[in-house]
Amino acid sequence: MGSLVGHVAPGFGFFLIGLWHLFNHIKLHALHPKSFISHPWFPTSKFRYLELVMIMCGSTLSVAMELFIGPSQHQPFDSDGTIPSYHLRNFEHSSISMTFFVYAAFALLLDRVGHIPPKARYDMSHLLGSVAFGQQLFLFHFHSTDHMGVEGQYHLLLQIFIIISLTTTLLGIGLPKSFLVSFLRSVIILAQGFWLMITGYMLWTPELIPKGCFLHSEEGHQVVRCNGDESLHRAKSLVNILFSWFVIALAIFSVSFYLVLVKIYGEKIEYWSLTEGYEEEKESLDIELQEENHSQ
């Protein structure tokens, strides 16, 4: 991270996984509403472990970029073997990727071991996923980079999505049949990815940097700085407005996506209005009263 590609590439990965989960959870619930069970990952018809292998490959590439490809000397250590301050963020980002690699690797291993009951397999995979989100939240919250600038504001708002991802993943252990928990988790994973991509483009595209702010090179990294407190306050407020618009768009997209997939895969359900039901009950009650009066 710390660059446009460093935000857009992992963001696109989160976006794809979130969209894949959202599609499959809605489809599964539409086809089997009474027997629905939340899944931590979904197999594909051609290759069962495609999702998990993609996570492992993406995590491996991220670690390689942070620790070996990105640094000018192709290794993150100083001449005396210590970690220089300008490479602390590289170790933080790679630690997040390592945790997601561990999740995917053990989720694959749990599925390969045949004698493990399905519920235990799903619960353990959810637990490993929550560990990955917990690690992500911890390292973003105590990030070594600036928390007070414009980039810090984007990362602060990102933590809202990470908290919800962590919470819904833990809830998936105790509430495996809750479609709402699975639906929300999928939407938020998608949102995490899209917000990371937005962050990358908004921070490292000179034309999109707020008025009164500019890109400044610090310890080999391009950082957005502002001319004064007023410009910084305005820039943060614009980030907050962008986030609020993003949440509105996310709600519209997720519910619309749900309605489209339910129409395609869902069972046909006959609906009746409350007014019609009320009139039927009223007519039935009137008939009963008339019969009672007639018998008297």
Image: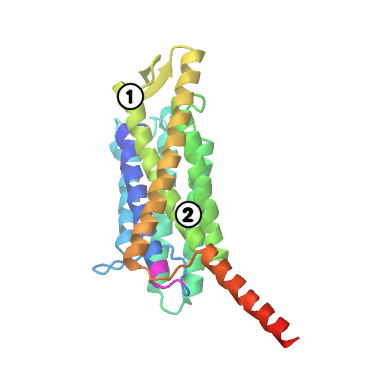
Residue 58 seen in render: yes
Judging from the image, what secondary structure is the residue with disc 1 in? helix
Task: Give 12 or 28, whichever is nearer the viewer.
Answer: 28
Crowd rating for badge 1 (residues with CA inside 10 Å; few <14, some 14–19, many 20+): few
- Residue 17 position, x and y percent, is 35, 54
Along the horizontal axis of the image, is 272 left or right of 207?
right
User: Residue 55 colored magenta?
Assistant: no
Mark 1 and mark 2 lie on one chain; the one further toward the N terminus is 2
Find disc 2 in the rendering and name its residue. 184
Judging from the image, what secondary structure is the residue with disc 2 in? helix
Quarter that holds the C terminus: bottom right
Along the horizontal axis of the image, is 19 left or right of 287?
left
Quarter that holds the N terminus: top left
Which residue is found at the position 45% from the left and 57% from the top?
A: 183
Find disc 1 in the rendering and name its residue. 208
Question: What's the magenta region?
Answer: 29-33
Label 1 close to label 2 by CB (< 8 Å): no
Q: CA distance from mark 1 to mark 2?
A: 30 Å
